[in-house]
Image (cartoon, helix red, strand yellow):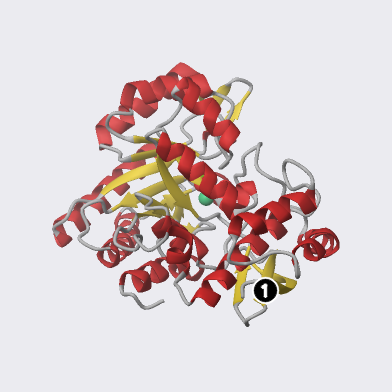
Amino acid sequence: MTRITSISLRRVLDSRGNPTVEADVLTASGGFGRAAAPSGASTGEYEAIELPPTEAIAAARRHAVPRLVDEVHAGNQREVDRALRGADGTENFSEIGANSAVAISMAAAKAGADVLGAPLYQHLGGAFRGDNFPTPLGNVIGGGEHAKEATNIQEFLAAPVGAPSVSEAVFANAKVHARASEILDERGVPAAKGDEGAWAPAVSDAEAFEIMDEAVSDVEDELGFEIRFGLDIAASEMFEDGVYHYGDETKTTDEQIDYVAEMVDEYDLVYVEDPLDENDYEGFADLTDRVGDRTLICGDDLFVTNVDRLQDGIDVGAANSILIKPNQIGTLTDAFDAVELASRNGMDAVISHRSGETEDTTIAHLAVATDAPFIKTGTVQGERTAKLNELIRIADDAV
Ligand SMILES: C=C(OP(=O)(O)O)C(=O)O
Ligand SMILES: [Mg+2]
């Protein structure tokens, strides 16, 4: 029986040292699931609302727990998530917090899988999932909102697209991360790390492109399979007064589109996330028109895992992929609906962590369950390796 018999909520630490919500779900037959909400720093304007954890927990205990315990089945994810939405009663989870909602939603999924005795990816994705693995996009150099005094572009992401296995891909990204550190040393540039464990040197974006290109080529030569790279520009964070700010320099929207298109061709970029402001569907469409045949243009802050915003994007041809972050929308059902809408329209769905994370591994299972081509979940650092190592275990049939 997957009937939920208890839900416990508590505050735990996230990787930035902030409190976040953890949920435990128990079922009638002893199934157990535990999950914790991640948290963004470069959050999109249209994301579901994250409440201070103490408030989110109190509100969820008051409104959600009584609507779920003894009422819904952890094995029926849509039923769980419908009850969460009903308990909250708002569009954006501003009553119980998307952090409480997503923790309960993911913990219920794990409890459902536990009762069935199936790995989470199989419970979520079905019996035919588990043969395809996402390529990990590994954050190697970064700045933006994730590190002070570093690059303007938020993330330079290694993409070992030719790796023969997920394990070799994971280790390839770690090698690129290590090689980037050596190159920075050779150039006499000290580098601390940003929130996701990427190097955060005080170099220009142009220099970061060079370092990334060199690191990727060196590791590609050493390992003998294709490694490319991509970006999360997180352009909404740079956009102010109608222009994009790169330190003291600015770019108009047309200049930004030209710049990104040039970088796609110069560096053979495989992936570009949020190249333009989160309200600029038209700019996204222009850029996708120009380079969408040879790279993924991915909407993160643009779509915020929201089917309505995704449909608006589909209508105008903005982007050819969507970033999926369950806490942007609040439940696994909503995240799955966004993946399905994307794939029905020929778009790729890329599963992603947040800059503030925990040891929770749900997104590794979600990526396998949804047959995602890429997962963005860092390169090194415990809360990132938790997901990467879980992918290796899934491939090894050891979960
Ligand atoms: C992971 C990201 O950062 P954050 O979690 O800060 O939004 C991102 O922008 O894709
Ligand atoms: Mg992003």
Q: Which is nearer the eye, 375 or 28?
A: 28
How many discs mark residues in the rendered view?
A: 1
The quarter of the image holding the C terminus is bottom left
Whether residue 351 appears in this view of the structure is yes
Q: Residues within 10 Å of mark 1 (few under 14, many from 20)?
A: many
- Residue 179's x, y, as percent? 29, 60
Return the residue found at the far front.
1
- Coordinates of residue 115 in the picture (x, y in percent): 55, 76
Q: Which residue is mark 1?
A: 24
* Viewer-proximal residue among 45 and 342: 342
Occupied quadrant, residue 389: bottom left
Q: Determine the residue located farthest toward the bottom in the rendered image.
A: 30
Give the image quarter of residue 293. top left
- Reply above or below: 269 against 257: below
User: What is the x, y in percent for residue 356?
Assistant: 59, 59
Secondary structure of the residue carrying numbered label 1 = strand
Along the viewing direction, whichever of 205 and 29 lies nearer the viewer: 29
State the residue at coordinates (79%, 46%): 89
> Residue at the spot x=46%, y=51% of the render?
351
Position of 284 compared to 15: left or right?
left
The quarter of the picture where the N terminus appears is: bottom right
Q: Quadrant of residue 279?
A: top right
Up/down of 339 relative to 71, above or below: above
What residue is at 38 percent from the left and 25 percent from the top?
Answer: 288
Direction from residue 282 to residue 218 in the image, left or right: left
Q: Is residue 248 at all visible to an observer of this figure?
A: no
